[in-house]
């Protein structure tokens, strides 16, 4: 029913857009061309059929094979002063056999000369990196499939008000206000659930089992009947099971966020800087009453998010045929000394990379390094601290080589990611054939390896081979 309602809402939205006339008032904005006729709604998108074979049956539900269909629809209308856009993706939720739908974006944009205003659900990328970033902070990520999906499907649109100001020949200033906070999304069960989440679920499950026994034992003398005591215990356990994860409500104005970004060009270098006041998207998870269980215990997980302040810089240039990119950022919390066990420490992150077309233009090589370091790690190196970990840094090498053959209709690529601290890695080979920029047939693989608690090794059971056919319209 929800899918039908969302689809009908989108259709109504398109119907409303179609008759809107193009604005004729040039007092604030001068278009390159004008027309007295109504602008048409542009419709584009794609339909993709995917068949995926998993090494472990648990990765896809009840069978090793998992088939799904994804449909993307993008609508756009642009007048002289106003632009309206919406995008929707319809696809299965993680592994159940039903269809989910979500907006990728839905916004209005008003052009006023050097100033344009944008409002709605917006997906906005910040930074000069190629997919890997240190300063891209406006949108949360949908990681319910870890990195198994493409970047677009991972980005969660945010409700925001955004102003873009062109400052003469100096550069561009972007100002963004987000009234609410959206955390990153993770799978909570199954093969795509992070290792830490699985451990927490196991601890809560064991605690609830112990609590049920203690509760049954405590009420049995009162009710005097084994069956009634069992039913009362089951009823109370069911009620508590639905409230094991207690999250703060981040859809409140007190969780508002704001940021700015300035970009410009000096000689051969594109560069910029940014600032952001918001929240860390990774949660703080604290398990309560999971040891020393009694009938009065209340086993649960408290999930909260830390306020953080961020400053960063970015740059890109072309040198001797190499496209160079760099980003760096520092993120601080209120635990500046790093010794508060219930507040996350600040972090410093960076991205350095390049790509280059090799001679004859057949092969492109893209190499990026990405790292993050927890500030004041010595103060956090105590069991029970929310930052306590085996490693206080994460350093990754991301490499991709792609060759195009047969008049660039056949693309062969290999992408690899290696995390140094955990010695874990991911590989994604792919062969894709494209016909007239309309249809693409692709065969690809996903391989994850490492220790069970490592970044990529925790998804070792999710190795897969995928065949897809995408048709654009």
Image (tube, rainbow, N blue to C red):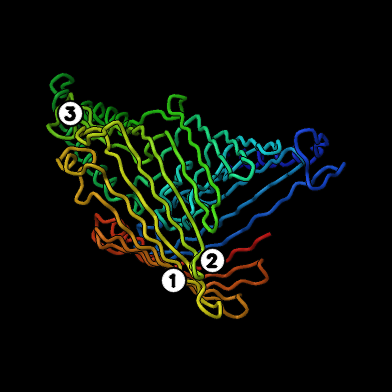
Q: Secondary structure at mark 3?
A: helix
Helix, strand or loop under label 1: strand
- Residue 182, image x, y percentages: 45, 37
The secondary structure type at the circle numbered 2 is strand
Residue 224, given in percent of the width and then of the height, sits at 15, 22
Which numbered tag is attached to residue 216? Answer: 3
For residue 215, the mark is none
Q: Quadrant of the C terminus?
A: bottom right
Q: CA distance from mark 3 to mark 2?
A: 53 Å
Q: Looking at the image, which is closer to me, 318 or 389? A: 318
Measure the alpha-carbon separation of dots 3 and 1: 57 Å
Mark 2: give few (<14), some (14-19) or many (20+) Cα within 10 Å. Answer: some
Q: Where's the N terminus, which quadrant?
A: top right
Query: In the rendered image, which residue does mark 1 sit on?
Result: 414
Kindly identify which residue carries mark 2.
468
- Foreground label between 2 and 1: 1
Residue at the extreme right: 36
């Amino acid at each position: 029913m929800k899918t039908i309602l969302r689809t009908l809402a989108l259709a109504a939205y398109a119907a409303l857009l179609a008759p809107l006339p193009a604005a004729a008032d040039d007092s604030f904005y001068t278009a390159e061309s004008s027309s007295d006729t109504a602008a048409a709604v542009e419709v584009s998108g794609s339909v993709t059929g995917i068949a995926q074979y998993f090494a472990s049956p648990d990765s896809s539900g009840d069978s090793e094979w998992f088939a799904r269909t994804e449909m993307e629809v993008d609508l756009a209308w642009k007048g002289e002063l106003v632009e309206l856009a919406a995008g929707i993706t319809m696809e299965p939720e993680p592994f159940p056999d039903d269809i989910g739908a979500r907006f990728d974006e839905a916004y209005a944009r008003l052009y006023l000369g050097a100033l344009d205003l944008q409002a709605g659900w917006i997906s906005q990328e910040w930074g000069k990196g190629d997919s890997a970033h240190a300063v891209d902070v406006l949108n949360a990520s949908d990681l319910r499939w870890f990195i198994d999906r493409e970047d677009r499907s991972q980005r969660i649109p945010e409700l925001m008000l955004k102003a873009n100001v062109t400052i003469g020949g100096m550069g561009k200033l972007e100002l963004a206000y987000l009234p609410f906070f959206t955390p990153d999304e993770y799978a909570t069960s199954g093969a795509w659930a992070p290792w830490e989440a699985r451990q927490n679920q196991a601890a809560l499950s064991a605690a609830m089992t112990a609590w049920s026994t203690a509760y049954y034992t405590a009420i049995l003398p009162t009710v005097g009947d084994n069956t009634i005591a069992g039913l009362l215990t089951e009823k109370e356990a069911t009620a508590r099971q639905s409230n094991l994860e207690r999250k703060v409500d981040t859809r409140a104005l007190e969780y508002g966020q704001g940021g700015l970004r300035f970009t410009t060009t000096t000689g051969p270098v594109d560069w910029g800087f940014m600032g952001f006041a918001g929240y860390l998207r990774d949660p703080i998870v604290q398990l309560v009453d999971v040891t020393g269980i009694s009938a009065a215990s209340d086993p649960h997980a408290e999930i909260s998010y830390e306020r953080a302040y961020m400053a960063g810089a970015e740059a890109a240039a072309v040198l001797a045929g190499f496209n160079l990119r760099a980003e760096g950022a520092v993120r601080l919390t209120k635990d500046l000394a790093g010794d508060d066990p219930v507040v996350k420490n600040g972090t410093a992150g960076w991205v350095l990379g390049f790509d280059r077309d090799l001679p004859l233009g057949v092969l492109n090589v893209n190499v990026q390094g990405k790292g993050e370091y927890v500030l004041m790690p010595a103060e956090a190196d105590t069991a029970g601290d929310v930052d306590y970990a085996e490693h206080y840094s994460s350093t990754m090498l991301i490499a991709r080589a792609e060759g195009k053959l047969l008049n660039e209709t056949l693309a062969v690529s290999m992408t690899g990611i290696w995390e140094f601290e955990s010695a874990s890695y991911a590989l994604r080979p792919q062969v894709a054939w494209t016909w007239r920029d309309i249809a693409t047939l692709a065969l690809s693989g996903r391989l994850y390896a490492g220790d069970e608690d490592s970044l990529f090794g925790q998804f070792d059971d999710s190795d897969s081979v995928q065949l897809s056919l995408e048709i654009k319209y």
